[in-house]
Image: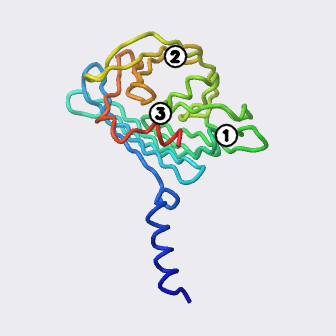
């Protein structure tokens, strides 16, 4: 039986250390613009619980012509990271009726990849093509969330820029990819890429709450 003194002590401990029992979460929605037209959204939520960071991404894009949907893309991706290393990925996408997938499992310091384009084993410190933590810029191999393809990348700082009125630092990603990434400090702001011959860019709904501290906590 817990006496009055014990009850007060337990209650005080719970109030004094809420970070030990509550997860930290940050979520963001990006509007996706193609040649200036809004074609959909990219939603991401990152949650830390203890040593694990869980990432949930949902994407829906529609390109319309004369009011009719001419192209559709959808993705649902779930990842788990532990101490900066990927534990698992389960991503499924629908590229205008063509299904694709990327599944990753950590094993013996490596990552076992099972994708619709590529399957095999890669280094355990590989990143994914989710961009949300700036730390990925330091990694030379990114696993495609669309199809499992391991992509060799080279991140090069370009300099000051801006997206949607937000001051950023721009990075050019070369190698097996050709995109631009924007960060405000350590916070991911945007990605710019070619979408069927037209320029596409992400515009965030804001930068609060910040996602970067969830990674570094």
Q: Does residue 18 lie above or below 94 as drawn?
A: below
**How many other residues sit within 10 Å of disc 3, few (<14), some (14-19) or many (≥20)?**
many
User: x%, y% of residue 178?
Assistant: 50, 15
Q: Nearer the viewer, residue 101 or 50?
A: 50
User: x%, y% of residue 41?
Assistant: 33, 37
User: Residue at position x 35%, y 31% from top?
Assistant: 71
Q: Does residue 20 lie above or below 56 as drawn?
A: below
Q: Which mark is residue 16?
A: none
Callout 2 secondary element: strand
Q: How far apart are the alpha carbons under marks 2 and 1?
A: 24 Å
User: Residue at position x 40%, y 45% from top?
Assistant: 26
Q: Nearer the viewer, residue 83 or 19?
A: 19
Q: Residue 145 falls in which quadrant of the image?
A: top right
Q: How far apart are the alpha carbons under marks 2 and 3?
A: 14 Å
User: Residue at position x 25%, y 33% from top?
Assistant: 68
Residue for badge 3: 132
Residue for badge 2: 173
Q: How far apart are the alpha carbons under marks 1 and 3?
A: 23 Å
- Residue extending furthest right? 108
**How many other residues sit within 10 Å of disc 2, few (<14), some (14-19) or many (≥20)?**
some
């Amino acid at each position: 039986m817990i006496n009055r003194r014990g009850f007060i002590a337990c209650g005080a401990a719970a109030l004094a250390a809420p970070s030990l029992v509550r997860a930290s979460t940050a979520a963001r929605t990006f509007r996706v613009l193609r040649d200036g037209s809004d074609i959909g959204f990219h939603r991401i939520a990152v949650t830390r619980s203890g040593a694990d960071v869980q990432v949930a991404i949902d994407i829906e894009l529609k390109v319309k012509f004369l009011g009719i949907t001419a192209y559709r893309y959808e993705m649902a991706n779930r990842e788990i990271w532990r101490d900066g290393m990927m534990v698992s990925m389960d991503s499924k996408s629908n590229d205008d009726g063509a299904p694709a997938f990327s599944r990753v499992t950590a094993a013996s310091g490596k990552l076992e990849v099972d994708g619709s384009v590529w399957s095999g084993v890669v280094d355990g410190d590989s990143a994914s093509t989710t961009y949300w933590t700036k730390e990925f810029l330091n990694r030379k191999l990114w696993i495609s969330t669309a199809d499992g393809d391991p992509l060799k990348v080279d991140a090069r700082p370009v300099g000051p820029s801006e997206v949607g009125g937000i001051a950023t630092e721009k990075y050019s990603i070369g190698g097996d990819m050709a995109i631009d990434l924007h960060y405000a400090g350590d916070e991911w702001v945007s990605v710019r890429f070619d979408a069927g011959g037209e320029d596409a860019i992400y515009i965030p709904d804001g930068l609060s709450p910040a996602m970067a501290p969830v990674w570094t906590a």
